[in-house]
Image: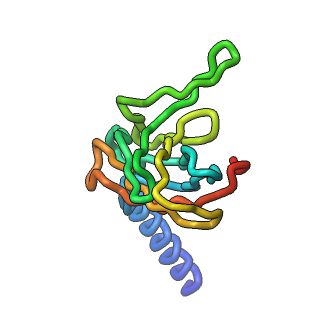
Amino acid sequence: MKLASAIVALVVLLAGALWWVGQVAPESPIEVGNARVRLVPGGGPMAGYMEIRNHSEDVIRLVGATSPAFGNVMIHRTIVSDGRARMEHQSDGVQILPGDSAVFKPRDLHLMLMQPRGALEVGDQVEIMLRFEGIAPAEWPVAFTVVPVTSQ
């Protein structure tokens, strides 16, 4: 009888814990993962990639970025048309629906990192401040890892 009561109490406690976890909102409205910068030797423009997950219940928009390591940071998308690739500035930013992600990857969305202010090496960390609309705080510092130009 004591064993049955203990099992019932354990099941009730576990059910309560699962319910509570389901009711708790994520700590952060966004999550940024796999943040990396592909190193281009010779001081040329570089590209930044990442995945931004929207954990909030609101539509958010990445509207800009800055970095002390670069003179200019822009949001671009690579467009391939008639076998030719060109970059298109995302002047309206990138919208991310609740529960959805925006994936920045080669030959697609990316941060265009121009005018490097110093030499970088593979393995370095570069801070990039992402600026959003629709969440608070609006600015999110993210550490990007410098990877070889051949990395995906």
In this view of the protein, which residue sits in the foreground, 117 or 56? Answer: 117
Q: Is residue 22 left or right of residue 87?
A: left
Picture quadrant where residue 69 is located: bottom left
Q: Is residue 76 above or below residue 20?
A: above
| Percent of width and height locating residue 65 | 38, 47
The residue nearer to you, when weighing 81 against 98, is 81
Q: Residue furthest right?
A: 150
The residue positioned 37% from the left and 62% from the top of the image is 27
Above or below — where is 57 with respect to 91?
Answer: below
Q: Is residue 69 left or right of residue 145?
A: left
Any part of residue 148 in sight: yes
Which residue is pictured at 38% across the width and 55% down the height?
Answer: 129
Q: Position of residue 123 (x, y in %)?
A: 63, 66
Instruction: Tell which residue pokes out farthest to the top in this image.
Output: 82
Image point (28%, 51%), residue name: 138
**Viewer-side residue, 26 vs 113:** 113
Q: Quadrant of residue 121?
A: bottom right
